[in-house]
Amino acid sequence: MPPDRFELSTADIAIIVVATLFVVIVGLLAARKVERTTEGYFLASGTMPFPDENFDLVTCLGVLHHVPNVSKLLREIGRVLKPSGYVIVSDPIISMGDWTKPRRGLTKNERGIPIALFRDFIHSAGLYVVREHLHSFALTSRWSYVVRQSPFNVKWIVKLDSLLCSLPIWFRCYHPRLAIQKLRATAVFFVLKKS
């Protein structure tokens, strides 16, 4: 039975992210299956050079919406994850604008993942959802003008964001046609577990 709550402090998350990035980059460099670009390291084949069932925890925060084949990467994560291992994922679930036109601050192929499709990819990867939490309400980032720092570093704003995103009154459309449809959660946080 999965835990009712999965709580991590900010320090715990920071340690997990740094340790995971270090392990992944060192592993990739050791395997010499990476190519170095100006943007960092990437796998030319899209396949992770790790043995099956190798990791207890995989973190993937704000990465999937940059990857051309999200379902393949999630299957690879499922493959390298040990049985009963966890995956922590957070990514946008909105279209991020009209792809046919240049979008300020975004790469050409950058797009969110529709939440229903995201869930299908998770299931296809042999993973199940322990916790799903919508976050990043469309107007939350505007609080930075008031508090003069990242609003996600202010506890009461994070709680307000969580409350707003949990309300069932907001639109859930992937690509809004009207300005009012932009009032919604823009990202999802998943805690996943391998069956």
Image: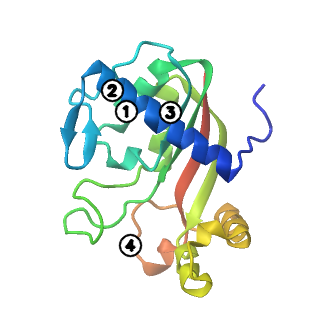
Depth check, mark 4 against mark 2: the one in front is: 2
State how far apart marks 3 and 2 are (Cα): 24 Å
Depth check, mark 3 against mark 4: the one in front is: 3
Image label count: 4
Q: Secondary structure at mark 1?
A: helix
Coordinates of residue 180 in the picture (x, y in percent): 50, 79
State how far apart marks 3 and 4 are (Cα): 28 Å
Comes first in the chain, label 3 or label 1: 1
Comes first in the chain, label 3 or label 4: 3
State how far apart marks 1 and 2 are (Cα): 5 Å
Q: Secondary structure at mark 2?
A: helix
Label 4 is placed on what type of residue?
A: Arg
Of residue 186 and residue 173, the one placed in the foreground of this image is: 186
Depth check, mark 4 against mark 1: the one in front is: 1
Name the residue: 37% across, 33% down.
Answer: 25
Residue wearing tag 2:
28
Residue wearing tag 1:
25
In this rendering, does residue 65 appear at all? yes
User: Residues at badges 1 and 2 in contact (C-beta under 8 Å)?
Assistant: yes
Residue wearing tag 4:
177
Coordinates of residue 172 in the picture (x, y in percent): 53, 61
Name the residue: 41% across, 13% down.
Answer: 51
Crowd around label 3: few <14 · some 14–19 · many ≥20 (10 Å) = many
Name the residue: 39% across, 63% down.
Answer: 175
